[in-house]
Image: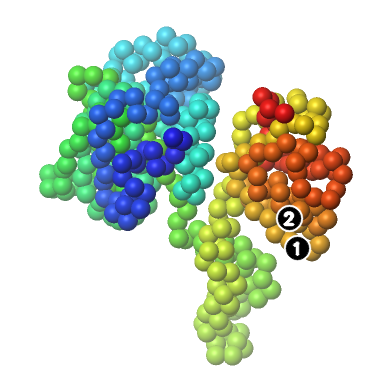
């Protein structure tokens, strides 16, 4: 089973999750399977991450008892001070929690897991790893500004959750003692368990007798107001919106008045694009920033000149692609980045986009094998296609 979103919320179905829990209430899934997440991130992966050279520079954080954060310039008094691994490990022995923010930047296995879910949910994911020694607490009582999935990888952690005084908070705020007393709920997270905490719900977690390792996956989905940002991009290229805002005295020249004129302009702008088009533009903008950030690119580069009509080619399934005809070209959008090809290549392009894998000489179209080969090479350069090193 591919480890995607369905896997982390199993046995709850995606439908039930989005209808009953998403942005609404806490979900705790107990599993009795301590190795449930080992294909996503296991202890060897974490150890391997710690061996990365970047870990000798203070990019991680340590948190002290009761959520007291220690920034690295307190720990190390020189800005560009490279620490040794012994110094890192020693902090753990002394009871500090190790927090590795954005662990996907250091671990390619976890990166490919987050990429898959990111594509499934049209959202950006950020994974933070917490190693908390016994009888400790990494972070004090707080709420997050994004939804969080906590995956318990090792040991146990006792969570306390409270209420959500503000539905969609813009600041971390505070929770009154009264709210804490009235709304406290307790969960013990064991290895293999999942806890989903919607944004805004206050929480804190501490360990008892054992060290705990868990990862939080923050889900940063586009908000409704981001649709207005897309509309603003349209407005910037619109003649009426490009006009200077008139002085108050001049506003009478606008028919019913400036207020009415402005509402009319807004309504014309809104009618220009449907809500689903705006949503798609947001998604394309997000993908464009990540475009072609996929493994195997160096292998493709090294084997590129060896491609022949027997080479086996694979399409990268995490790349979002679509095609359309416009102005005498067939256009292809790959993770939001657009490329155009002469219309004569339409059949060949469509064959490539609709197959997960193929041999070069199977590709449809009236063109010579050389032309097809060149088109395939072009798609390899964009990252859509990859050479199957074991096939062909
Ligand atoms: Fe949190």
Relative to 302, is 40 on the left or the right?
left
Quadrant assignment, res 3:
top left
Q: Residue at x 75, y 31 (%)?
A: 311
**Which residue is at the front of the view, 260 or 291?**
291
- Above or below, 335 relative to 225: above
Circle 2: element type: strand
Residue 272 seen in this snapshot: yes
Relative to 201, is 308 on the left or the right?
right
* CA distance for labels 1 and 2: 7 Å
Instruction: State if disc 2 and disc 1 touch (CB < 8 Å).
Output: yes
**Which residue is at the front of the view, 356 or 124?**
356
Q: Which mark is residue 326?
A: 1
Q: Residue at x 39, y 19 (%)?
A: 43
Mark 1 / mark 2, whichever is N-terminal = 1
- Above or below, 81 relative to 389: above
Q: How many tags in the picture?
A: 2
Crowding at dot 2, Cα within 10 Å, few <14 / some 14-19 / many 20+, comes out as many
Name the quarter where the N terminus is drawn.
Answer: top left
Residue 353 spot, x, y in % from top left: 67, 48
- Above or below, 162 relative to 293: below
Residue 135 spot, x, y in % from top left: 21, 21
Residue 213 spot, x, y in % from top left: 33, 24
Residue 243 spot, x, y in % from top left: 66, 74
Residue under pointer 2: 331
Q: Residue at x 77, y 31 (%)?
A: 310
Crowding at dot 1, Cα within 10 Å, few <14 / some 14-19 / many 20+, comes out as few
Q: Which mark is residue 308?
A: none
Q: Residue at x 33, y 36 (%)?
A: 150
Residue 61 seen in this snapshot: no
**Residue at the farthest front position:** 362
Relative to 353, is 9 on the left or the right?
left
């Amino acid at each position: 089973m591919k480890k995607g979103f369905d896997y982390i919320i199993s046995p709850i179905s995606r439908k039930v999750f989005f209808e009953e829990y998403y942005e609404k209430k806490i979900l705790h899934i107990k599993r009795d399977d301590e190795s449930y997440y080992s294909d996503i991130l296991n202890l060897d992966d974490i150890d391997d991450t710690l061996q990365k050279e970047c870990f000798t520079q203070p990019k991680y954080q340590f948190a002290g008892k009761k959520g007291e954060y220690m920034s690295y310039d307190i720990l190390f008094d020189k800005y560009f001070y490279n620490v040794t691994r012994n110094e890192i490990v020693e902090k753990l022995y002394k009871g500090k929690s190790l927090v590795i923010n954005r662990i996907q930047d250091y671990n390619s296995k976890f990166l490919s897991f987050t990429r898959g879910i990111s594509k499934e949910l049209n959202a950006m994911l950020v994974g933070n790893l917490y190693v908390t020694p016994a009888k400790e607490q990494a972070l004090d009582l707080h709420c997050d500004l994004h939804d969080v999935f906590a995956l318990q990888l090792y040991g146990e952690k006792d969570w306390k959750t409270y209420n959500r005084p503000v539905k969609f908070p813009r600041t971390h705020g505070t929770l009154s003692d009264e709210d804490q007393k009235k709304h406290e709920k307790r969960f013990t997270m064991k290895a293999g368990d999942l806890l989903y905490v919607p944004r805004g719900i206050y929480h804190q977690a501490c360990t008892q007798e054992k060290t705990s390792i868990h990862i939080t996956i923050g889900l940063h989905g586009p908000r409704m107001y981001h649709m207005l940002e897309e509309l603003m991009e349209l407005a910037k290229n619109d003649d009426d919106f490009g006009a200077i805002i008139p002085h108050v005295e001049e506003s009478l020249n606008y028919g019913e008045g400036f207020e009415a004129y402005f509402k009319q302009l807004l309504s014309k702008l809104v009618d220009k694009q449907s809500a689903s088009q705006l949503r798609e533009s947001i998604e394309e903008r997000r993908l464009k920033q990540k475009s072609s950030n996929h493994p195997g690119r160096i292998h493709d580069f090294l084997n590129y000149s060896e491609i022949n009509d027997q080479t086996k080619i694979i399409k990268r399934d995490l790349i979002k692609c679509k095609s359309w005809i416009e102005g005498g070209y067939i256009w292809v959008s790959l993770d939001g980045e657009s490329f155009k090809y002469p219309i004569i290549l339409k059949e060949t392009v469509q064959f490539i986009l609709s197959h997960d894998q193929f041999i070069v000489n199977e590709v449809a179209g009236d063109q010579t094998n050389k032309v097809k080969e060149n088109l395939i090479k072009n798609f390899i350069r964009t990252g859509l296609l990859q050479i199957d090193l074991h096939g062909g």
